[in-house]
Structures are given as structure tokens and as C-alpha cells.
Amino acid sequence: MSVLAVVLLETASTSSVAAEGFSIGEAITFWVLGPIALAGALGMVFARSAVHSALMLVTTMFCLAILYIVQGAPFLGFVQIIVYTGAVMMLFLFVLMLVGRDSSDSVVEVLRGQRLAALTFGVGLAALLVAAIGRSLTSVTPVGLTESGAGSGANVTGLGRLIFTDYLFAFELTSALLITAALGAMVLAFAQSSGHAKRGQRATVTARLRGEHDQISPLPGPGVFATASSVAVPALLPDGSVAPGSLSEILGSTPVADIEQYDPAGIDARSAGALRGGRAHTGRRGETGADTRPADAPREDQD
Amino acid sequence: MTPTYYLLLSALLFSIGAVGVLVRRNAIVVFMCIELMLNAVNLSLVTFSRIDGTLDGQVMAFFVMVVAAAEVVVGLAIIMSIFRTRRTASVDDANLLKY
């Protein structure tokens, strides 16, 4: 991470030294990061999993941030890293994990030939843009930001002056936009959760006592009043008998191979032993409950 | 090495994002493609700012970032509420207004 910071600072300083001329370092940075950004974008479009798409987009955005810094816009570069890759993409990942991670893309074409048309459109758009930019901007000589006194050193102050003088009205409008967006997100996210009326504490207790549930109290945990707190040890009732509600259904129904009956000779023998062990296990569980000591025994053990 | 290369990269990224919006079916991935298009435009704005020698392009890129952040928040909330009611995040399944 510190190496990255050094590289960022170095590229920023080189760009401030030669802002209108193009240094070798900038060319190297561009030709390394540009293909990575393109590969990340292509991978985002063509990755099957949505999480992979999000990670590819993070790569692309990071490359773009470094390209901003190289071009004499360090403030925008760091805002890109913090806001886009830090906040927006993490929000995307949150929603992906909540919603659409397992919902893979349907390969069914709803409109016939739509994918082919989209690909043709994309290739045509890219060709047109590249041809137009390439033909019209060949002999352009950039003024550069250092010449006009807004290089990387004065970048933040220059941006601040512009935002709070020329673009003040737009800036105020963005604050209204952000508040509206936050309110809208809260309304959209919380609207459905207030569908059913919540029952109060007193009403819940009354419903429990009137017999809405099977028993008044919650189920006893394993090992209550017993000698051990393991999941395999059932809880004991005050008279010392096994509380049936504390028996784990999963443990009871899981086949367990017994050590004495374990036969390493063959798979068939092993599976048969597993079945027998499962039955033996459930039987043993009952015995465990039967011969555990009465309720006050563990307290004596602790003394 | 002229700033034209940055603009070419920006154009390519924009085209890839447009293709992604048209091809993908997962609403969240469609949103990510829109983010890619906004980023491509930001790159071209920063490059224009450098060509022009003024900071106005960077201010515009900054505003684009603000609007994109607000758009992501609202859009993801809409996707969440659609997912709650329809149990799907595919853009093909949100077709109540179609028939």
C-alpha cells in the first residue's frame, strides 16, 4: 500500500513537472493501466457471476483514478478511489450479497437477435467514436494545467475557488439532490417493513399464556442442569428426567460410525456400520439422559 | 503521446458499458455498466480540462460523481424493493406494465 502511495505521488509530481509535455513515465503509466482498465471493463460485461463483475469494475475504476492523478487531477483521483471504489462499489457488493448473488443471468433471449444487435451497435459506436476522435484531435497541443496555474499543487484550491464562485448554484443544487436521494432510499428501503402491525410485550405474553404456542417458555438449551454443556447432552427437568425439547434433531438423525464397529476393509461395510452406529447413537443418547445425576449435582462439582 | 489516447480509451470504455447495458439481464450488473459509462465520461472530462488548461472540466467531473452517487443509492433501493416483491433481480421479470 505504501509502495502504491509512493507511485501515485511520483506520477503526480512528474505530471506537475511536465504537464503539457508528456513524460516517459506518463506514457508507461498509460500503456500499462489503459489495457488493464479495458480488460476489466470487458471482464465486467462478460463475467457470469455478478460478484466477479463488481470486482472487475473495481479494477477499472482504480486504473481510471490513477489516470486522473497522472493527468493533473489528484483531487478527482482520490475522490474516485474513496467514493467510487470505496463507497459505491462496496454498496454494490452489499446489495449483491443481499439480492442477486445466486440469481445468475438468464441465457434466454427475450427479443430475438437482441444480443447480436447490441454487439453490432457497440462495435459501431466504438468505431465511430474512435475514428472521429482520432481524425479530429491528432494535432491538438494541450495547454496543460501548470501553464494556467492550476497544476497538481494548486489543484484543490483552484477547484474550491471554482466550486464556490462560478458553480455555487450547482453546488447548492447537489446538496438538495443528495438529501433527496438519501430520503428516497430510506423511503424505498423501509416502506415494506411496516406492513404488519407489531404486537406489544403484554399482548405477546397474553398470547403465550392463552396457549398460542406449545409451551410458555422457550425451548431449554442443551446441558441445562446436566453435568456438561455439550450439544450432545440433553437438558434435565427438575426431577432429573430428560427434557425432550432439548434433544437435537440433527444430532439424533445424523449417522455416526462407531469406533468399535469401524471396519476399514471396505466402503460397503463402512456404510453399513454408519447406519448401525446411527441407531446405536440415538440409543446411547437416551442412556446419557437416564444416568445423569440429579439437578443439584453440578453445583457440588464446582465447589 | 497526445491526450487523444485518453479520449480513445474513454470512448472504448463507454462503448463497452453501452453493450453491457444492452446485453446483461441482471439489474445490478446493468447498473454497474452505467457506472462504467459515467466513469468513461469523467475520464474524457478530465482530459478536456487538461487540453483546455482550465479546471472547469474537473468541476464537471466532480458534479458527475455526486450525481452518480445519488443515482446509485436510489437505484439500488429500487432494485431492493423490486426484489422484495418479485423475488428476482432480473430486468426481464419486471414486466407488470407490459401486458
Image: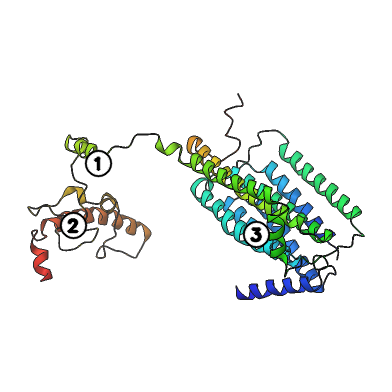
Tell me the residue at 88%/55% (across/down): A134
Q: Where does the image place residue A187, in percent across and percent down from the top left?
A: 49, 39
Instruction: Name above or below for residue A172 compared with residue A293.
Output: above
Instruction: Name above or below for residue A208 compared with residue A163.
Output: above
Taking the view exactly as shown, the residue that stands out farthest to the top is B99
Res A4 label: none
Taking the view exactly as shown, the residue that stands out farthest to the front is A165
Image quarter (top left, top right, bottom left or bottom right) of the N terminus of chain A: bottom right
Tell me, yes or no, whether dots 2 and 1 are on the same chain: yes
Disc 3, disc 1: CB below 8 Å? no
Image quarter (top left, top right, bottom left or bottom right) of the C terminus of chain A: bottom left
Q: Earlier in the sequence, mark 2 or mark 3?
A: 3
Please, what is the three-letter code of the amino acid marked with disc 3?
Gln
Q: Where does the image place residue A4, in percent across and percent down from the top left?
A: 64, 72
Return the residue at label 1.
A201
Q: Earlier in the sequence, mark 3 or mark 1?
A: 3
Measured Cα–Cα span from mark 2 to mark 1: 41 Å
Question: Image quarter for residue A103?
Answer: top right
